[in-house]
Image (tube, rainbow, N blue to C red):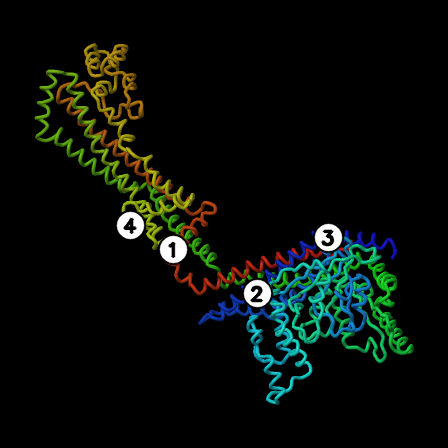
Amino acid sequence: MHADIQRNIAAALASRHSRIGEVDRFERSWKFLAKSVDSLIGEADAAAAQFRSRGAPTPDELEIAADLDAALSVAALREVRRAIFEQDENVTAIRNRIHRDTVNLGVIGQTQSGKSTFLRTITNIGTDVIPKADDLDPTTSARSRFRNDPERAEAVITLLTEKEFLDEVVAPLHLGAGYSEPPPSTLRGFADFQYQLRMARSAEGRAPVPGPGEQSHLDRLLKAQKSLPSYERYLGGGSLPITDLADLRRFVAYPAENSVDRPYHAVRDVRVFCVFPEVDVKDLQLVDLPGAGEAGLAIDRRFLYDLKNEVDVLLHLTRPRSGVTFFNSDKNIGILKIADEARMGVNRGDFTCLVINEDAVKGTAPEIANVKAKAREIAVDNDYLLVSGDVSEPEQAREKILGPVLEKLAERLVHMDAAAAAEVTRGAAAAAEAAKTAATHLTSSSGRWQVLLPSEDDILRIRSKELRNAIAEDLQDLAARYDQDARDGIPVPELERGITAARRRLEKWADSQFAGPGRDEWLSRLKRDRAGDPGETPDDWCTVVRQQIRREFSQVDGSLDGATARLHREIAKILRSSLPLGGLVPEGDQPFRVLLKTTRESGFRRLQTALDQLILFHAEYRNVAIRVGGPVVAQITYEHALSAGGALSDPADREMVKKALGEGGAKIAGAMTGPHAKIAVPLIAAETALKVAPAVADIVWEARLTDRSPEGFANALSDAFSRAVDLIAKRMREEACRLTATLAAVVTQFYDDLCRTPNVEWEYARLCSPICHELWPDAFDPGATRLASGLSRLVAQATATADAAREVVAAAADLGVGR
């Protein structure tokens, strides 16, 4: 052989192996696509079945069901699955091809074609391993591989499992023998099956005589049944090493006709490692393909599989004989047809080689010449490689047959791999594109389906948004009503009623003190008390007045709670009308406690913020009486009465103020001058009350107290009391009007927080999800929601399938580009 053959083949194999990553990605993506399409068909079948089971489907449901039936038709999903199934074997084959670390020559030939002789000549293995063709049916259907390995001389047998034996050997023979009953499903059932009974009944004329084909199958079943003890122990799968090749024959060849030692029945295939004398190609493997015509063992399918997955070049041997022409044999023509199917885009001339065996030629010279001429004609017409030589002669087998084949293989292997990859990836990409089109059609239909039959999630989102909008509309109306009251100057009713009631109580108290029968008694007591302490007594009575005013008006603050409670009741009613179930907004004094607890525990941050602001706002408006009435009441002091309208100048007055105000006030009074001063304005400014609200100074006391008689003081104090009550009532009413505007603002803020915060509708959906079937029983029909859920799963699977198809197309593009 030419010295470059080994080098070129090694380089070609290296190029092949450089693409292992690409072919593995391609195979993974392909298998995932096949699985995705199966899942898609399953989801479509399930969805269609749900629609078919609906007792009274709506028109929309009938429209969707028609879409599903169309998607499942032969022209759509099922056709896609068929296309994928057709390509699946090729994808596996190209993966095995790229991973193969040898160049494989498949050898096929009918009985007495010289196949066994050729294998023995190349491998130098004796007849104890590869029987002579003169033996009766010498070889079995087991596939044998012979690898050129100078360092090993052994074999490894791959064994069948019990199930594989029953499915792949017994079942085809059983059916081929003409039995209508099912084949045995267990090894014991096979051992006990009465195959012999049919033979006996036929011999006795009690049953039809089996036809030639049935008889052949029946004979093989009987041999397998009788010899079961010889191979039963091997039917466990796995491998069996053979260290002495002389022990291999019984596993690969038939014994004498009556022998019950037939362990070959347990053999799937055999790998033989040995040195090929004078063959320079180290990475060479010969594959002895199963002989054509093995009864009942589906040889054609196994042959096709082996060609795709095991063979780079097929050597088809024939031997010219008198009366036999190679191309008038249906079996030989059938083999070439299978080879043409198995080449996967590789040129015929690269894949198929016709070998004319000139060993021990029998027949006349004209017959032999005619066979060769016909072979050359067919080879030229079909672009087959044609070689000839005596397969029993080592030099001819090596140089005239094996040499030309390897030489061409060394030159063409890279191109053959590229052609096979391109062919397989084209078919796979086309199937993937069809899968993507079918899946995309389903996903594009989903938008219309969601309109016709929205999913439960879609319904929840829609209904939750409608609920939010209804709440928003009612809150907006409530805020507008409060705002209109504020513009119209309408005070908060609870405060207005409280102010009115407080004023009436104060007027009644004043009447009892400063008017009527009680006035004379009060004046007498005032006169008596002043005799003992002229400064302290008037101030004490001012204190009494101040305390009474504070006591009565402070009760108005309680009305604020009523106003707040009323607002909460109005808002709770709005929420309760939209959330009538689940107890989220119960009746009672604390209508928001459940809803607030739910929002906090569930992390509904936006809803929680809105509720917190609503519940806590009124704390800022507490103590209205202190804020509004405090500065006014603070003026009802004897010092104010004396200073109203002038400055303090009389030493006696200063002494009186000193006693009334204490040491600090005396220092201020002592520093003041003025011809008419009684209590200077700076002194008044020192009072805490006037620091709070200096704008009301000199209002309560109409004029400076000059008449210091009991009657004069009584009249001035009564008048100051009335003026203070009027002023506080006026200012508290103004505050009540401002509070109306404040409540309007509170409702508006609550409306904004609860209804207009971005993405708040998602919190509504989550809040309503546990009770959605109770809230909206008409929308969440269990049957419809199951249909919608089925469609959602179908669309999700369609999306995944389209993505898987795109990955196959991408992987196919990478692998299918020749290098």
Amino acid type shown at disc 2: Ile
Badge 4 is on which residue? 587
Badge 2 is on which residue? 41
Q: Earlier in the sequence, mark 3 or mark 4?
A: 3
For the residues labelled 2 and 4, the Cα–Cα distance comes to: 53 Å
Give me the disc on residue 771.
1
Q: Is residue 198 above or below residue 168?
A: below
For the residues labelled 1 and 3, the Cα–Cα distance comes to: 58 Å
Q: Earlier in the sequence, mark 1 or mark 3?
A: 3
Q: Earlier in the sequence, mark 1 or mark 4?
A: 4
The label nearer to you, 2 versus 1, is 2
Kind of element beneath mark 1? helix
Amino acid type shown at disc 1: Ile
The label nearer to you, 1 versus 4, is 1
Q: Earlier in the sequence, mark 3 or mark 2?
A: 3
For the residues labelled 1 and 4, the Cα–Cα distance comes to: 19 Å
Kind of element beneath mark 4? loop
The label nearer to you, 2 versus 4, is 2
Front one among 413 and 440:
413
Q: Quadrant of the N terminus?
A: bottom right
Badge 3 is on which residue? 19
Where does residue 55 sit, x and y in percent of width and height? 44, 72
Amino acid type shown at disc 3: Arg
Where does residue 462 sit, x and y in percent of width and height? 46, 56
Where does residue 364 sit, x and y in percent of width and height? 90, 78
For the residues labelled 3 and 4, the Cα–Cα distance comes to: 74 Å
Front one among 419 and 605:
419
Where does residue 730 sit, x and y in percent of width and height? 27, 34
Front one among 354 and 497:
354
Amino acid type shown at disc 4: Glu
Kind of element beneath mark 3? loop
Q: Is residue 379 above or below residue 652?
A: below
